[in-house]
Image: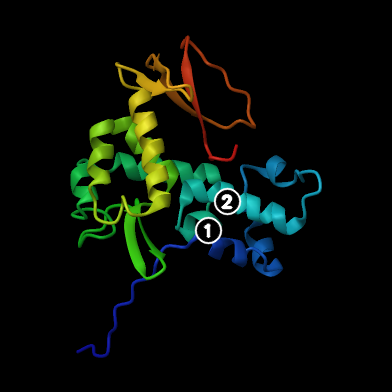
Amino acid sequence: MIEKIEEMRVGSWMLEEYKETVKQDLLYKSVANMMGFGLETRNTMRKQETEQERRAREVESKYQIVGGSCRYMFQYTTAEAIEQLHFAMASVDNFETLMDSKTGDRAKRMVNRLHGMYRVGDNVHWGLLSRFVATELAQRLGEAFVRKIEQLVGIAENPILRGVLFEMLFFARIGNEQGLRVTSRTGEEVHWESYAVKTFDPTQLYTSGIERSVCLKPIAWNQ
């Protein structure tokens, strides 16, 4: 008989925790090949950028994709992490049960790693792992999916998550047949037609193919 077992919930990593961690030279050297979007990007120093600033920039870019998963951050390249997340999204046959915590890593039967648990002050927020996962799902499932997430407890109260929701809503609508209606700073209403949304890496050459009009979504928010 097993006794004295204590369950511990380990929260997802926050951005500042990653930044503090990569300041340690020994650790950073062991994971350097996993950071950035490739060796060319990693070895490129911006003008007047220190080594620590470069490390923080790499972490901040990758955080938009892998979120609080330190495993994806330090054990997978960005391309590998994206592939793993796409596989995880493809493995879910019912996204309603995913968001209701009936499937996924909050459920009794673990299916994938699309959830994250983030501590903000004294509050704990459950949500999708990263901005990349959120916008990818919004593109696939449309505005109705975004509205369901909006109703989850704690989502609307978190200013960071509200920003992610806005981005999700944009990409859900711009790919819709009706397009998107926006209001300019002058108050004028403008209608944007529907566009195919394509995820791309701005550091690489992009070929549009047969599409006449596309909406290009960078892999990371600061690209």
Q: Amino acid at mark 2?
A: Glu
Dot 1: element: helix
> Which of the two labelled residues, at mark 1 and mark 2, occupies the earlier sequence position?
1
Number of other residues with Cα within 10 Å of mark 1, as a class: few under 14, some 14 to 19, many 20 or more:
some
Relative side of 93 to 140, left or right: left
| Quadrant, the C terminus | top right
Q: Which residue is mark 1?
A: 15
Colour mode of the rendering: rainbow
**Quarter of image, res 124:** bottom left
Position of residue 110 measured from the top left corner of the image (x, y, whole percent): 26, 58
Whole-angstrom CA distance, mark 1 to mark 2, is 7 Å
On the question of residue 58 being in view, the answer is yes
**Quarter of image, res 109:** bottom left
Q: Height in image: 85 above or below 187? A: below
Please give the name of the residue rendered at 33% of the width and 42% of the height, measured from the top-left corner.
89
Q: Which residue is mark 2?
A: 60
Q: Which residue is nearer to you in this view: 50 or 76?
A: 50
Position of residue 98 measured from the top left corner of the image (x, y, whole percent): 23, 49
